[in-house]
Image (cartoon, rainbow, N blue to C red):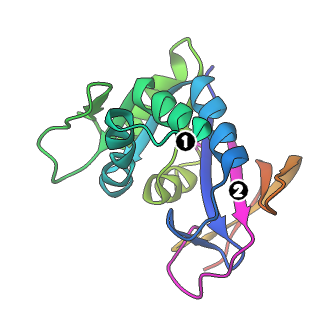
Amino acid sequence: MRKVIAAINMTLDGFCDHTAGIPDEEIHQHYAELLDNAGVVLYGRITYQLMQFWQDLLKNPSGEKTMDDFAMAIDKIPKIVFSHTLKNVEWESAKLANRALEEEVLELKQQPGREILVGSRSLIIQLMKLNLIDEYQLCIHPVVAGGGLPLFENISDRTVFKLIKTKTFKGGAVTLYYVPTDEKTTTR
């Protein structure tokens, strides 16, 4: 069975904002390798549209090897986009989901292949509520944003995680690898 991995960047104060982090060569290389080893990535509309920046970088490479490598990795991985407003997607490797998130993910998990990445905050929240995430890879950047969208917003169940690994980057970011345990209680 394929694993669902939630991989996202966060600030020290717990906010998800792709522009608040401090990406460097090592972080770009890390995420390029993560994409290269996955079978598909799931995005919501907002994150999908943010990631289209990398299409422009493919057309006009930056000259920075790890950024250009990341652009190639994100270009080639199949993407499934969940949106109620988009009518089509321009990225050749992307398609719009034609089923509900839970149904799509349950089917993907049963198929052979590499891991399923989830890179959108909204999808991570929804999949967490459905107990469909097998591993969390939270890359904490050494910055306080002072505001934004918290990752674990509107979660009503207490979930306990087990830390299975860490990865420290030279620039001060740390990726924490967690798996959920079976210990849950409703907080309402």
**Residue 134 visible in the displayed image:** no
Going by the numbered disc 1, the residue's amino acid type is Met
Task: Tell me the element at label 2.
Answer: strand
Residue 67 numbered tag: 1
Residue at 38% over, 32% down: 79
Q: Quadrant of the N terminus?
A: top right
Residue at 63% over, 65% down: 10
Please tell me how crowded label 2 is: few (under 14), some (14-19), or many (20+) other residues with Cα within 10 Å.
many
Residue 139 numbered tag: 2
Q: Looking at the image, which residue sits at the far front?
A: 63
Image location (x, y in percent) of residue 49:
30, 52
Residue 66 sits inside the magenta stretch: no
Image location (x, y in percent) of residue 109:
54, 25
Looking at the image, which is closer to me, 134 or 93?
Answer: 93
Residue at 51% over, 39% down: 63
Looking at the image, which is closer to me, 12 or 58?
Answer: 58
Could you give the CA–CA distance between mark 2 and mark 1, rounded to whole angstroms?
Answer: 17 Å
Please tell me how crowded label 1 is: few (under 14), some (14-19), or many (20+) other residues with Cα within 10 Å.
many
Image location (x, y in percent) of residue 76:
42, 23
